Image (cartoon, grey):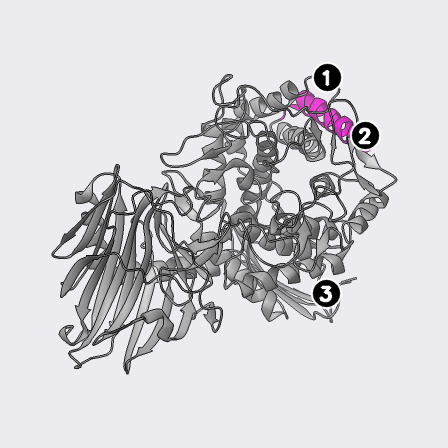
Amino acid sequence: MEPLIMYKDNWDYPVILGGKKAFIVLSRRGVLSTPWSRYGPKIDFGGLYTPPIRATGPIIPLIQLNDKIEKLGDHVTKSMYFGSHLEASYLAYGIKIKSISYVPHRLPAALIVFDIERCVEEAIELKLYLETWGGPLEQDGILPDNTEIYLYQGGAAYEVDEWSVVVQSNIKPTNIELDTREYKKPGPIKTLPTANPDKIRNAIITWKLNKLGEDGKIVMSISSSDKGLGTALKYSREAIKNWAYYLEENIHRYRDYLENTLSIETPSPEINLAYKLAKAALETLKSEQPEIGVAAGYPWFARFWSRDAAWIIPTLLLIGDHGTAREYIDIFLRYQAKREYKVLGGLKGEVLMHYGYKSLFYYGAADSTLYYPILINKYLKTTGDIEYVKKRWKKIINLVEWGYYKDLDGDQLIEHELREPAKFFFIDTTRMDTIYRGIRPIEIQALWSAALRSAAEMATQLGIDKQAKKWLRESEQVKQKLMDEYWNSREGYFYDRILGDGSKDPSIRPNALIALYLLDIPRELAIKALDRLKKPDILTPWGLRTLSSYDMKYAPDKYHNGMVWPLVTGWLALANYKYGRKDEGYSLIETMARQIIREGGMYAEVYRGDREEPQYSCILQAWSITLYIQSIIEGMMGIDIDSINNRLYLDPKPPNQWSWIILRNIAVGGAKLDIDMDLNKGIIAISNSGDKKITVSIWDSEIEMPPKSKKVIEKLNVD
């Protein structure tokens, strides 16, 4: 497998590798040590994470000759990222060393394989500096004070509360010792706060390189378990014993995901590379807790968040990963509130705010429940799985009924207030959960209208025509109410919310993009709104701010009052494509592609509003990644899949200078289509590898594709 990207600079920038049960944070040097900012100063977030805990702190390989000790990572000569693993090469004291770091797909463990050139120099040693941890993911930089650390013949182990961590290798170390020296502080990393500073919590494991023998491999395993030290040790031994198998399994897993889901090739190498990196990152974020889903973001948001899922699932469906999409939807339907749960902030029909292994869950999101009729309808349309909808129809009805309940005054607009008691978190919040946006935010009304329309379309498919007509009529009424109440003609944009006293908030925020994307807004108004979002007070060269810089509330480091989000940048790209503004849409896609490549296959959650710098941000955020993919497939390529009717709609809107596009593995019904387009000559070649006839609608042409067929159509009108 060829590397997806070769790192050549910015060596301390973080990389995340993951499996179902664990992920690791490491630098491009191939070292589990990397500086990052969460809240305030940069600290070292390198290590193994097994949600819901950070299992280890930084793990740093050192190279020693006589009394001179250096970090092996400082001697890096090459580093390659494959998605499945990271491979780094070093040259230290004349010795060539290669490391391969990865996470076994089904184990709560990580592996680091050192392949060391034969060494006869007795004085050269490889050391591994280990900092213990064992605290919750959310305790950023705070070390647990109750760690019990043990040294044994094969390595080191420690226990924190119910969690156990084992670090060992395939070769018996020549020395293991407790140590309080710190080797982990390159540049701006500050000393971590420790609740019990007098307790020794670090260990150093040493091997003499001339004792390794012909093989020259040190296989290091770091494992974690909440079932005791014995189980953690079992995982560690399993990983070491089968390290080659787990590496090969990872390579095959990523290769299959890249090759067998929807792929694109265009004349732009940057767009192509970022697309592959984004799909690999999406595979990295898949997690089992114990249900299968996609984590919202690593390292801190390792759970499944219902509103994040709403912007992840459409991409899973578009690329053909239907199974993950279905399981992800079902997590939130499974825990749908069956009645009112006051302590947890839930009303009947409501979906969870988030879900994760051994994680406190609660309800209370003002928007999440409204997404799920839309998502289930997308699933139905993309897969044609009508039985899925039939079996969940009562749950779908309860989702819609929740919306009616939230219209507290019967004016067809949903009210959103902080509900009491708010026991655990920001109960009854929108996506902008660190600021109050009551009582009628614009995106909630757009979601309500779209949810009613989606429910009506599903009811039509089930033959429930009377209910379908009612919901469709009410959907249109809510949309008209939104248009009447929220359009701000003075600003040429939408009000952000209506307050309790009836006054309207003119803040320029991206939330109206949900209305532009989900609803059919009159084109004249849509263009005015999109033009307003082009102005430099809200749109930066690195993405869309959450608030205009002209606003008194604006601050470049405020999460929802000025920072730049790839999520809303993707919304803007989709809306531009929807209303025929392909140049503006493509410019945003180029911005997102540049960021993904610059970050080496990662994509941050947020950036400062005054400079292109991630801050208070997950290193790898799922909806940042998926909005890039969705903007290309749905926006630029104009792909609309209707598996109910075995039909594919294509409306490509590429840059004018492009002469060709290649699409592979478009899943429609039970078929997969490959399409090659010659944009200059108006020629399209289509192959259907499935067992169903598919109709392809493109450029005002209808092309019938029988099962197992190939066709070349010429002289199509591409304008």
Q: Are marks 2 and 1 in contact (CB under 8 Å)?
A: no
| Residue 481 among magenta residues | yes
Amino acid type assigned to the residue bearing label 3 in the image: Pro
Q: What residue sits right under mark 1 in the picture?
A: 410
Amino acid type assigned to the residue bearing label 1 in the image: Gly
Q: Residues within 10 Å of mark 2 (few under 14, many from 20)?
A: some
Amino acid type assigned to the residue bearing label 2 in the image: Glu
Q: Residues within 10 Å of mark 1 (few under 14, many from 20)?
A: few
Circle 3 sits in a helix, a strand or a loop, which is it? Answer: loop
Residue nearest the observer in this picture, 51 or 505: 505
In the image, residue 283 above or below residue 587: above
Mark 3 or mark 1, which is nearer the start of the sequence? 1
Magenta stretch?
Answer: 463-483
Q: What residue sits right under mark 2 in the picture?
A: 485
Q: Are marks 2 and 3 in contact (CB under 8 Å)?
A: no
For marks 1 and 3, give the CA distance: 47 Å
Residue nearest the observer in this picture, 609 or 195: 195
